[in-house]
Amino acid sequence: MTPELSATALVKALHDAGLHLAIAESLTGGLLTSAFVDVPGASKVLLGGLIAYQTELKHELLGVSRALLQEQGAVDPEVVAQMAGGVRSKLAQKSGLDESQVVGLATTGVAGPDPQGGKGIGTVFIGISAPNGDYVYPLQIAGGRAEIRKGAVLAALAALGEHFL
């Protein structure tokens, strides 16, 4: 399934469920949000996306624990969980919605060319914060920088699809 088809199905499923989507990206740098923006009618579901590429912005914009970032680095399962929860909370509040109406989706990882904070190239974490629970998907994606980033987008779409398709 192509990203466009997955995102199209997810927009429909989230809309049918009365849910909205908030996205926090690091590794994917806007590619994930773009996959949803490509879908006609996405504005019925997509609240927005925040790209917090720099580690400090994960704390400042998304509320990720500064201590966690200092101890574990930006590529960590708990970091992505806090990113997903943070974007869900922030965009729900800014949109006048209850958090029960919003799903947070987040990505972090190492695309290379060098390892980061003891994490190898291709280490990726996808986080989902939803009314039915919070989920983290640890992944190892092979390839170069572009392949890892595209693979992370596909993995994020698939992870969201597990819960809403």
Image: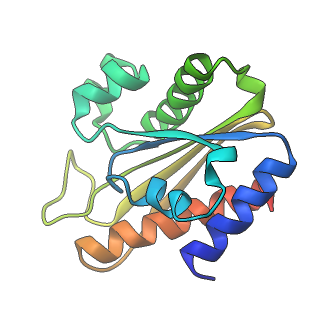
**Residue at image location 67% in from the left, 67% down from the top:** 8
The single residue placed furthest to the front in the displayed view is 40
Say whether residue 106 is left or right of residue 52.
Answer: right
The answer to whether residue 114 is above or below residue 21 is: below
The single residue placed furthest to the left in the displayed view is 114
> Which of 54 and 9 lies nearest the eye of the viewer?
9
- Total labels drawn: 0
The answer to whether residue 80 is above or below residue 64 is: below
Which image quadrant is residue 5 in?
Answer: bottom right
> Which of 28 and 124 lies nearest the eye of the viewer?
28
Instruction: Determine if residue 68 is in view.
Output: no
**Residue at image location 18% in from the left, 58% down from the top:** 115
> Which of 18 and 104 lies nearest the eye of the viewer?
18
The answer to whether residue 110 is above or below residue 19 is: below
* Quarter in which the N terminus is drawn: bottom right
**Residue at image location 25% in from the left, 65% down from the top:** 121
**Residue at image location 33% in from the left, 77% down from the top:** 147
Spot occupied by residue 72 in the image (x, y as percentages of width and height):
31, 34
Spot occupied by residue 138 in the image (x, y as percentages of width and height):
51, 56
Spot occupied by residue 23 in the image (x, y as percentages of width and height):
51, 42
Which image quadrant is residue 104 in?
Answer: top right
The answer to whether residue 29 is above or below residue 60 is: below
Which image quadrant is residue 132 in?
Answer: top right
Instruction: Determine if residue 144 is in view.
Output: yes
* Quarter in which the C terminus is drawn: bottom right
Here the colouring is rainbow
Say whether residue 27 is left or right of residue 140.
Answer: left
